[in-house]
Image (cartoon, rainbow, N blue to C red):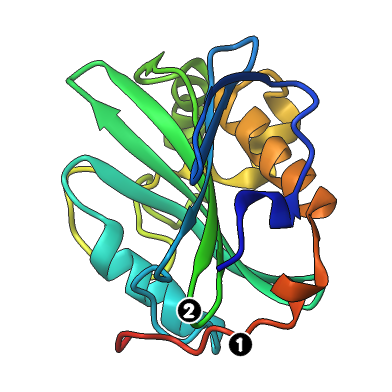
């Protein structure tokens, strides 16, 4: 069974808070929490390809009255398939938190990196500004709130237009922008030992 030391990634901006055999926790200066853990079993996921299958699976299984899917994609890093997802979670009636997850699944085990931003007041300044622009745009054809992979999905809490990464450059200090940047930094810095790279790949363990 591999250990946490089998995979490394950039944590230069974080301060260690907790460490155990199967879990390490860090925080950063904005009080975001990052967890890195190893699991004896991979997560319940369908085959990672085609991409549309796991995206629709995520929309069907992960969306609920307090969680909204923003994005799910599958990347290949150092020969490994990595599932990267971004979610938005409602906290009470007036706050939200953004969550980033990196799953590195294999047939017999999995690594997981999770980042949870500190709660922010909802609607955020980003959402307020972009919603005003959307409502004043006579050419806007898409609804303000819509699941990114199942447009007909209905819920009281969904991804909204302001969550789109295309707006990150306009809001460089927004927590969602910073979360996505952190996920990119982590993924690009992942390094592994040969034992992990040679492990039996993940083929899915649940139907999409």
Question: As rendered, which of 183 and 16 lies closer to the eye?
Answer: 16
Left or right: 67, with 19 as reference point: left
Residue at 61% in and 22% down: 174
Please state the total of marks drawn on the protein image: 2
Residue 40 in percent (x, y) is at: 42, 66
Residue 54 in percent (x, y) is at: 44, 77
Mark 2 near mark 1, Cβ–Cβ under 8 Å?
yes
Which disc, if any, is residue 200?
A: 1
Question: As rendered, which of 197 and 186 lies closer to the eye?
Answer: 197
Camera sees residue 150? no
Camera sees residue 204? yes
Dot 1: element: loop
Question: Against 34, is 28 above or below?
Answer: above
Residue 115 in percent (x, y) is at: 53, 36
Left or right: 198, with 2 as reference point: right
- Dot 1 surroundings within 10 Å: few (below 14), some, or many (20 or more)? few
Left or right: 110, with 66 as reference point: right
Question: Against 45, is 9 above or below?
Answer: above
Question: Against 115, is 5 above or below?
Answer: below
Residue 180 in percent (x, y) is at: 65, 40
Dot 2: element: loop
Which disc, if any, is residue 108?
A: 2
Mark earlier in primary sequence (2, 1): 2
């Amino acid at each position: 069974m591999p250990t946490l030391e089998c995979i490394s990634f950039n944590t230069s901006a974080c301060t260690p808070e907790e460490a155990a055999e199967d879990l390490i926790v860090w925080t950063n200066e904005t009080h975001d929490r990052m967890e890195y853990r190893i699991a004896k079993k991979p997560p319940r996921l369908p085959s990672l390809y085609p991409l549309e299958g796991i995206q629709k699976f995520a929309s069907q299984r992960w969306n609920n009255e307090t969680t909204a899917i923003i994005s799910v994609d599958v990347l290949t890093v150092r020969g490994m398939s990595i599932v990267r997802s971004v979610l938005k979670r409602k906290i009470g009636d007036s706050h939200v938190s953004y969550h980033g997850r990196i799953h590195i699944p294999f047939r017999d085990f999995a690594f997981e990196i999770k980042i949870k931003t500190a709660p922010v007041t909802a609607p955020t300044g980003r959402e307020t500004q972009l919603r005003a622009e959307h409502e004043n745009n006579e050419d806007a054809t898409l609804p303000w709130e819509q699941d990114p992979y199942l447009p007909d999905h209905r819920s009281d809490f969904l991804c909204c237009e302001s969550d789109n990464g295309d707006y990150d450059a306009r809001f460089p200090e927004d927590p969602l922008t910073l979360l996505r940047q952190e996920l990119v930094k982590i993924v690009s810095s992942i390094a592994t030992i040969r034992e992990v790279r040679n492990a039996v790949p993940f083929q899915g363990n649940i139907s999409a």
